[in-house]
Image (cartoon, rainbow, N blue to C red):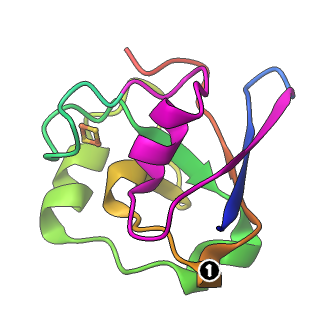
């Protein structure tokens, strides 16, 4: 099971294990990670699952779709080059060790 480390805006770290095939958003909700809301359930309609992906992992993730790209313009905190909506990232063993930073707010 791949592990994900979430770093909060104040520097606190939470490590969870995800099931292969689950989105990172569902894994975060299952793991009670504070700072991921996922209000739309992963249908790319809320942008409350915004994360900043650690640079080392940027090339290992699927590309940003057109719809995700549009929704990334609606995040509560400023979009950055490494911004992703984590409901669009399917977990697999290839992503074991993935590290992301949470924005200060999702709303
Ligand atoms: S959960 Fe709504 S866009 Fe990701």
Percent coordinates x, y for residue 43 in the rendering: 13, 46
Q: Is residue 101 left or right of residue 86?
A: right
Q: Which residues are magenta?
A: 12-37
Q: Is residue 27 above or below residue 62?
A: above
User: In the picture shown, does residue 76 fall above or below 21?
Assistant: above
Element type where label 1 sits in the image:
helix
- When asked about the image quadrant of residue 11, the answer is top right
Relative side of 52 to 47, left or right? right
Q: Is residue 84 above or below residue 38?
A: below
**95 relative to 3, above or below:** below
Residue 3 in the image, given as x and y percentages of width and height: 72, 60
The answer to whether 81 appears left or right of 98 in the picture is left
Of residues 19 and 24, the one nearer the viewer is 19
Q: Position of residue 12 (x, y in %)?
A: 86, 26
Query: Badge 1 is on which residue?
Result: 93
Q: Residue at x 65, y 67 (%)?
A: 1
Instruction: Identify the residue at image location x=22%, y=45%.
Output: 42
Q: State the residue at coordinates (37%, 14%).
A: 107
Q: Nearer the viewer, residue 89 or 81?
A: 89
> Residue at 53% across / 39% down in the picture?
28
Q: Nearer the viewer, residue 82 or 20?
A: 20
Q: Is residue 15 magenta?
A: yes
> Where on the image, by quarter, is ligand 1?
top left
* Magenta stretch holds residue 13: yes
Residue 79 appears anywhere in the view = no
């Amino acid at each position: 099971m791949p592990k994900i480390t979430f770093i909060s805006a104040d520097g606190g770290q939470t490590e969870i294990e995800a099931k292969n095939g689950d989105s990172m958003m569902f894994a975060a909700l299952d793991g009670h990670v504070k700072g991921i809301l996922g209000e739309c359930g992963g249908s790319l309609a809320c942008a409350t699952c915004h994360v900043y992906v650690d640079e080392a992992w940027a090339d290992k993730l699927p590309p940003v779709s057109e719809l995700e790209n549009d929704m990334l313009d609606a995040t509560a905190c400023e979009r950055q080059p490494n911004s992703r909506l984590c409901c669009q990232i399917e977990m697999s063993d290839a992503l074991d060790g993935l590290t992301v930073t949470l924005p200060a707010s999702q709303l």
